[in-house]
Image: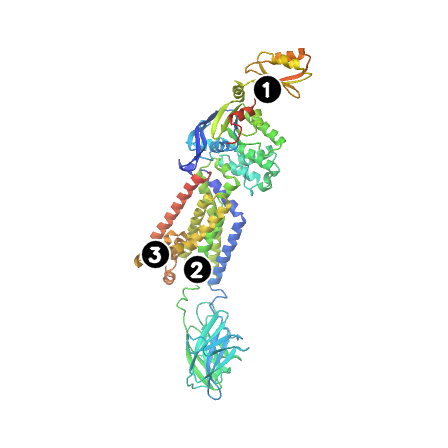
Amino acid sequence: MIEVQGLVKSYGGRRSVRALDDVSFTVPRGDIFGFLGPNGAGKTTTIRILSTVLDPTAGTIRIDGHDLGDDPLAVKERLGLMPDEVAFYPTLTGEQHLRYYASFHKIPRAEARKRAKESLERFGLGDAGSKKLKAYSHGMKKRLALAQCLLHEPEVIIMDEPANGLDPQGMRYFRDLIRSLNHEGKTIFLSSHLLSEVEQLCKRVGIIDRGRIVAVDSIENLTARLAVGAPAILHVIATELSDAILEAVRAISGVTAVERTEAGATVTASPGTDVGPEVSKSIVLGGGKLREIRTEQRNLEDLFLSLTKGGPA
Amino acid sequence: MNLLTFFRGLPQVARQEFLANLKSVRLLIMVAVLALAVVGGAYGLSGGPGGGNLPPLVVWPHPAYETNGSHVASVFVSDPFGSPRADVRVTFSSSFRATGDLGEARTNASGFVRFPMGNRTDVFVAAQTGTVQVGSQIAWFPSLVNFTWTTDQFDFGGDSVRETLAVHVVDRSGAPAAARLSVNGTYVRDVDARGYGRLGLPVGPSNIMIEVAGEAETFTVFVFEDPFGSLFGTPDATLFFLSAVFLYLIVPIFAIVVTFDAVSKERVQGTLDLLLSRPVSRSGVLLGKFLGSFAAVAFPVTLVNLVGLGVITATSGESPSGGFATAFLGFTLLLIAFYVLLQIIFSTLAKTSGTAVLFGVLLWLLFNLLYNVLTLAIGALLGDPAARFQFQLYAGLGNPSAIYQQLVLLYAPLNLTGFLGGTAIGGDVLGAAAAVWLVVLLVLALWVFERKAAA
């Protein structure tokens, strides 16, 4: 659905800076693709190029089979953009905005009017539709941004930090909305730095750092890849852990280190080993009161930090 | 790229730009300014009441005699209507250049001043008030009658015909005389207590008779049809001054004020990305911005111009010649197009609203002030007079405002251009220059927008 190949964007003349360097990824139809990266990594630049606002320096982009360079209008017709900064014309009303934007898509006037009304209702702006934008709160603008993004029923929806500046209810609303759009068959390109949000919504992610793609895969595969070669860590929550018990645990084959903690102990074992059953057995037999043993999961955050060297470029 | 693609988004953007501008406060303000200049100018210049060019001060100098026979200068200072001007400084000089070398005095409450001259037979008199100085000469020579008079002709009607004759009469001692005034043998009126009287005369020669105590003097006064009378005050002349003086300066400001942030505002407020992500082409957006801004300026300006034409017709009783009026309306649209395009380019380049405003001010200054200074300087640098002549002849082609002015002149009636100097450049060259300007600005605007719109 979205195919990006060798995308380059450089600014400036002779001593140009490469904002994007050989960026390639593919988003299949119907996918929710998470696009991650530290601030300044090139997320917004990529999105502005995808949404035909910015011209790439090199590379090809195909959206729904249409080449962005050869047939930008076909791409634009299929695209809904929800920009990071929701900015509108302060002296137009919400409804005027939607009708103005609808006028660019080949939507008949009566139909545009109908859709604008419906969409304002759908996003809880029914009463605000006739108010000028200068009277809108941030949350209302976000909802209007959604309305304009979906008005022409695009196949591909590009969202840049959609949850930015939203309260917890708003964020949940957005998550549910994205899921339901996905159920309708829309392809969603979601850029965010909120890892938890991406983790909840996306199967596949692309991670960009300093203008380069450092990983594109499913979250499962990426975390599994991260886990390979890394020691397994068990968090033991227990009381009455005698020294003898800890010694017994240390003696288990594969265990490399045992450390007493406030809640119990942390056990480190060789990569690829599963020492959980042995550890619990030792504790119980030694007279300790075991509450829980939890194997530490590698999550998106670890992955993100390890791939992006832990900080902004 | 086919033509439909090229223009994609144009009508929508143009309509939006037009409507948004039409509702803006700045447009209202500019319409008010323009209407004041055009309608007020049309009314004032076409010779409505209050026109005419009257001197603020009139000096009535007379040669007079003391009882012992020595000379005395008797001077009355008034406004053109004969109301005395008190406490005006009057200087007496032996020559035109020697200001006040014989002495000075101030007029009394009745507007008179007397200054002893001994046996001098001539003196230069000048009255001064504020920054105005009016002078005349007095000469003493033997007279057949026991009174002297001076006259002045004024254009009280504001039609450039000086049909009012004002007369001031004093007796031999320099005191106001009781004089009877007749025109062509018919008594008209007496002068007032200060010796001032006014006669309305027909165009052509009139015989004026002044009688004082049984003595009479007769002389002939000519009221000329002013040589420029056919020029100033005519509908065509009024229209010319409207376009060359008022519109020439105000229309560019109007265009700049409406257009200065046409693109930069979208960028600054962040709406440009959403607009460009629509199924539009950059060229369509830019041309839409241009046409929308152009229409938002052209519509009210043409409306005000039409009202101005109506006012000229109503006050002068005849309308300007059709060709000239049409050219005036049309070329004003061209002037708008020039400045809207210029400002759209700068608006695309401006990163902030402040820069956009600055660019607008500079743009206006460039073509309305700096350009003339520059061409003067370059002309001065060209040592060869022939080269300088050629340069200055065509220098105006580099200035859209000057092209407008010359195009309007080109269509003005010949008697008008004959007096105003006209333009030595033919319509073909001017037309070509205007076309080149338009095309170059349009291409430049498209190119700049293509490159810089979302950079």
Above or below — where is A244 with respect to A172? above
Mark 3 → mark 2, Cα distance in angstroms: 32 Å
Mark in front: 1 vs 2 = 1
Subunit bearing disc 1: A
Nearest to N terminus: mark 3 or mark 2:
2
Rendered image: mark on residue A296:
1
- Report the front residue among B441 and B269: B269
Above or below — where is A229 with respect to A38? above
The residue identified by callout 2 is B241
Q: Position of residue A258 (x, y in %)?
A: 61, 17
Q: Position of residue B123 (x, y in %)?
A: 43, 79
Mark 2 surroundings: few (<14), some (14-19) or many (≥20) residues within 10 A: some
The residue identified by callout 3 is B381
Q: Secondary structure at mark 3?
A: helix
Residue type for callout 3:
Leu
Q: Secondary structure at mark 2?
A: helix
Subunit bearing disc 2: B
Mark 1 surroundings: few (<14), some (14-19) or many (≥20) residues within 10 A: few
Quarter holding the N terminus of chain B is top left
- Report the front residue among B120 and B141: B120
Mark 3 → mark 1, Cα distance in angstroms: 84 Å
